[in-house]
Image (cartoon, coloured by chain):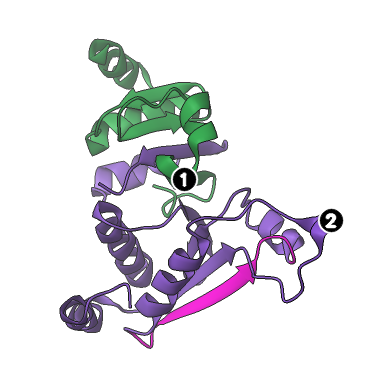
């Protein structure tokens, strides 16, 4: 268990109170191959397994959250559709894909951000001011925002 | 912001796991925000400032917003 028992309880209550609509955590990971073929040795994804566990554990805390785990290599076409080019990756999806991605394990300080994103997507609303929301509507060109963070 | 407009994509990237990106964008401290490869902001950014940067990247700043963005530098 990555999430401690006492935190699970707090999160369960929070999700019970805050979640409205379903949220899907579409995660891309590195699946462990059943056979080891020497010619296909790949670089191991150090944090994939733990990120996958984290996604599963969070999904267990509310019936409104589903974990949808995919293999980055075996399902390369799907990864491409989501615009995902590195792993571990989590797309937080609601009734549609909003283009929200988390790359790397959402642990430590980032765990809180992960939970906030899930809540916003479930509410189908963000905490942005009405003025900001209104102004963002005018954008008609691709804007890619990358925020670099660390877990500590 | 990604939620509000389908033209906007928002990524959170953990630097220790993606060192090549930290090197590419010269991430020396976190948080660091990179917009469309070429606009960068160090440290945490208030919502209204981030909005200006995003509108700038989309090329739709009005005169008043342009002044406000200029005064930030």
Query: Which chain does the green colour mark?
Result: B
Query: Which chain does the purple colour mark?
Result: A
Q: Tell me the tag on residue B17.
A: 1
- Identify which residue, A79 or B10, lies in the foreground: A79
Which mark lies nearer to you, 1 or 2? Answer: 2
Query: What residue occupies the far bottom of the structure in this picture?
Result: A63
Total numbered labels placed on residues in the image: 2
Pointer 1 chain: B
Range covered by the magenta-colored residues: A62-74
Queried whether the magenta region covers residue A73, the answer comes back as yes
- Identify which residue, A87 or B32, lies in the foreground: A87
Q: Is residue A110 visible?
A: yes
Pointer 2 chain: A
Queried whether the magenta region covers residue A148, the answer comes back as no
Both labels 1 and 2 in a single chain:
no
On the image, numbered disc 2 is attached to which residue? A39
Local SS, label 2: helix
Local SS, label 1: helix
Which x, y percent locates residue B4?
Answer: 41, 52
> Quadrant location of residue B52?
top left
Q: Residues within 10 Å of mark 2 (few under 14, many from 20)?
A: few
């Amino acid at each position: 268990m990555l999430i401690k028992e006492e935190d699970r309880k707090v999160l369960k209550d929070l999700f019970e109170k805050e979640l409205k609509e379903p949220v899907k955590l579409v995660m891309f990971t590195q699946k462990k191959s059943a056979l080891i073929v020497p010619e296909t040795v790949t670089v191991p994804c150090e944090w994939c397994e733990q990120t996958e566990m984290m996604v599963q554990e969070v999904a267990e805390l509310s019936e409104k959250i589903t974990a949808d785990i995919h293999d980055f290599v075996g399902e390369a076409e799907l990864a491409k559709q989501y615009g995902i080019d590195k792993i571990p990756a989590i797309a937080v999806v609601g009734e549609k894909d909003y283009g929200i991605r988390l790359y790397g394990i959402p642990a430590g300080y980032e765990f809180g951000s992960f939970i906030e994103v899930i809540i916003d997507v479930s509410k189908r609303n963000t905490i942005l001011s009405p003025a900001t929301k209104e102004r963002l509507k005018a954008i008609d060109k691709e804007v890619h925002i990358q925020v670099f963070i660390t877990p500590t | 912001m990604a939620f509000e407009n389908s033209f906007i994509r928002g990524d959170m990237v953990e630097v220790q796991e993606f060192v090549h990106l930290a090197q590419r964008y010269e991430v020396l401290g976190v948080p660091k925000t990179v917009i469309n490869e070429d606009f960068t902001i160090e440290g945490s950014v208030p919502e209204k400032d981030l909005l200006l940067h995003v509108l700038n990247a989309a090329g739709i700043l009005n005169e008043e917003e342009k002044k406000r963005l200029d005064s930030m530098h």
